[in-house]
Image (spheres, coloured by chain):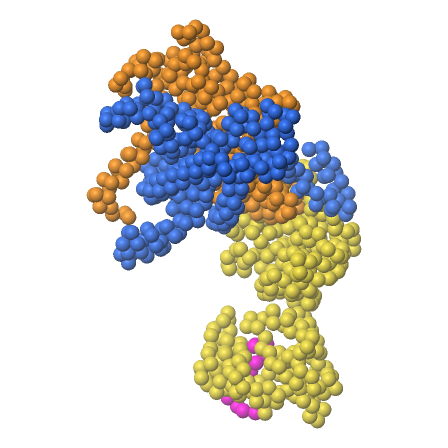
Amino acid sequence: MEHESLAGRIFRGVALTLILVFFMFPIAWILLMSFQTNEQILRIPPRLLFEPTLANYEALISGQLHTAAGNLEITFMRNLWNSLVLSSGAVALALLLGVPAAYAFARFKFRLGETIAFTLLSFRFAPPLLVLLPLSLYYQELGLNDTYFGIVWVYQLIALPLILWIVRGYFEDISPDIEHAYRLAGHSWREAFTRIAVPLAGPGIAAAGLLSFIFCWNNFVFALILASADKQPVTVGALAFVTASGIQYGQIAAAIVLSVTPTLLLALYAQRYLVEGLSLGAVKG
Amino acid sequence: MAGLEIKSVTKVFGAVRTADSLSLVVEPGEIVAVFGPSGGGKTVLLRMIAGMFEPDEGDILVGGRSIVGALPERRGIGMAFQNFALFPHMTARDNIASGLRAKGRADAASRVQAISRLLKIEHVLGHMPRELSNGQKQRTALARALIGNPDVLLLDDPLRNVDAKLRYEMRLELPSLLRRGTAAVLYVTQDYREAMAIADRIAVLVGGRLEQIASPDEIYLSPASVAVARLFGDPSINLAETTPLVEHGTLFAAISGARMPLGMADTLPADRPYWLGVRPEDLGISFSAGEDAMPARVLAITPMHEKAVLLLRFEDGKEWLAALRPDALNVVADDAVFVRFAQEAVQLFDRETGLRVSLSHRRQAA
Amino acid sequence: MSMLQLLQANALVGRKARPRGRALPYLLSLPALLVCVAIIVPFVAAAVYSLQRYRLNLPYLRGFIGIQNYVDFLTDPAFWNTLRISLVYTALTVVIELLLGLGIALLLRRPTRFHNAVSIVLLLPLMTAPAIAALMWKLMTNPGFGILSYLVGLFGLTDFKWASDPSTALFTVVLVDVWVYTPFIMILLLAGLRSLPRQPFEAAALDGVPATFVFFRITLPMLAPYIITASLFRLLDSIQQFDIIYAMTQGGPGDRLMVFQVQAYLEFFQYTNVGRSAALLMILWVITNILSNIFIKNWLRLRARAHSQA
């Protein structure tokens, strides 16, 4: 393996280049598009060199769109804000609910705990519409569709299994004797939990939190079905954008860039934990 | 008033009685070693005292007050763990001081200084546990357990994970360290030598039952059962099955082609099967035959510690070990020899119950 | 937390505290239990709806009809189309992603700086919201100005309609799925490859064992648990794919991409037929439940292995 033939090295180089092009090109191209005017985009053949414009971003941020058909209000920044509120809210709630539960599942072997842990895990793989469609019948009546809490609550379906299973693994890796020692030194159960178990599982809690945030942010179908227009995140908002008449392509591209940038940055930041998060804690990176 | 009192404590896990009606009293200032094979229930016993499990039956008292059901942090117990269990995110100093701080002691700093000087870890107080050697970790863990002057001190095989040299040093150091206060000390170990070196008394725990609680000498010289006899001594005690015969008012055991005198016939019922035990160092080897000598062949000679260990095979195929001083040794492998032992060296155990049977001439336990 | 404080306070008084001490784990997991209930209640509701004649526009006709919704599927070409498309989509995406992901993982196997950087960059598509990814590809495949339409035009395919043409729609959404999810397989298998013990490979290299033999007899069998877990993971997600297909074509053109969840969504919101939509989802649930039971077994095995290494 160390001594590769020349043909092998050429093959490896070509293969890696093709792979990088295939996976990176769409992101790069959309990024370029977001700095182009409609005329530049529609030009054939397309050019790599062009005079960049920030007009698309300006229009999105100001919320005012000037089109041939007249002025159009766009709520994209509102969608972006909603995404932020919904995802952070969902992660905060999931951590609040999930970390103590993960601790209980790791430290006490009890049947109800296993049942909960596995129910949440198996519903992670059940069709989400199975839960969402019946909920949609009542969400509107209850007024939950127009509250952040209503959406944050259903996002637990995404965030909770992730946090529960990753953090549980971290708690299981801490020797119980360390907590026993802390208690014998005169501390209560709650102090041992907050000052020993939680700090030691800290990296796992942070990783699970970041990943849940990414998955909540990227979610589409939950809000599509349950959220009122006022509470929709970027994923749903961006799609509505495309179908709205008179939208310029550069603005769609700019909207895409704005909606993926936060998760891509977070992913780069948290990449050390991605493997573990993606496998729900089954594979360590 | 007793420091620690364990009263008929029983704990069952599934179908296994991990602790079977254990009773034990440890006086303040006394060190009792809990010794036994792994899986014998030693750790479970410590954990019941520390409050990680509760006993199914029985009671545990500290200073005369029951602590069953009390929270671990309210039991007044210090504990050192086999794997040290240091708090990985705190310095050695904070590890040691954690208990004092919880109680809001103002003199924490000076007491940490004092105990770490005693344990020779002053220079590493600012280090994180991962920066400490195993020996330093062990001393930090001990300091943490000792600093609060607990009524009861539990040590769970504290020398298990340190190297041989350090283990030797600590064996010498520990008894005086542990006797500084008035704690009742329970010291779990799997090493009988450690138990004998450190403890005032040894409690032998086998299969969830306390086989014997006695001083180290007594346990070695008069083990209560064949199980205890087997656990103490390295190489371990030689055993032979025998049904003694009575001749002219004296008891003899016919083993491996010899008639070994045991003592007065009226001291124990004859015509019953017994285990006859002789420690390897009590065997004598010579080239002179006799009625009271077991003919044997030397199969192998191995040095062990400061002794030479001989593997002997008797005519009936049974194999025993003898431990001799090397300078007293004038045999080589394959020699035909004769093996003798003194009446006083014999230990007899009932074949059915495994319990020791005393003989009238036995010398008094020291 | 006031319940907890109460618990603690009671626990201090000693012996009597123990029964309450035992309640602690239950108390801690109570919120998670609530979430479980919040999932199970609508799930049971869906199961009940699937046995009803239940149309939102005709509320007075609502009533139990047993398994009639399911029986209707047997003779319904739309259902068989949905089942077929879902299975074809799943098979295509999982097979392509597995082969491609395994290939990339093998290429990046040696943990050099460059390889690590590539593997991190390749994760970006996976971290893009699938619905947004579909939009990106929609922009790139626009017949008017899409760069991909232009590029295939250079090869003579001037009238390539991508997702809007029934004959290439499946290809297009599979392409997007491959773009998004191949990195998932890649990253799991890469972690698996790098965690394999080295001795068998070193021994094989010393003995001059041919590379193909090493790959099929050593690498693949040792990697099998990772391959199985990653594939099942993808299988479960793929058969339920909604975001990419809905964002790209809403199941069209015609009924060309009517996979389970898209069909169920349209049954519900367009045709307001709750009963039929629920029955469709129950069938999908049965399929995924069987798969996820197999998955969880494999997953637990991997998880135990990861923790014993720690």
Residue B92: image location, x then y, percent:
56, 43
Quadrant placement of the C terminus of chain A: top left
Specify the colour of chain A.
Answer: orange
Asked whether residue B354 is in view, the answer is: yes
Name the residue: 74% across, 54% down.
Answer: B60
Over which residues does the magenta segment extend? B278-290
Quarter of the figure with residue C34 = top right
Residue C57: image location, x then y, percent:
59, 23
Which chain is tinted yellow? B
Magenta stretch encompasses residue B283: yes
Residue A235: image location, x then y, percent:
47, 24
Quarter of the figure with residue C159 = top left
Q: Is B173 or A260 nearer to us in this picture?
A: A260
Specify the colour of chain C.
Answer: blue
In this rendering, the answer to whether B285 lies above or below B129 is: below
Residue B216: image location, x then y, percent:
65, 67
Name the residue: 64% across, 47% down.
Answer: A111
Name the residue: 53% across, 25% down.
Answer: C271
In this rendering, the answer to whether C198 lies above or below B351 is: above
Name the residue: 38% across, 39% down.
Answer: C92
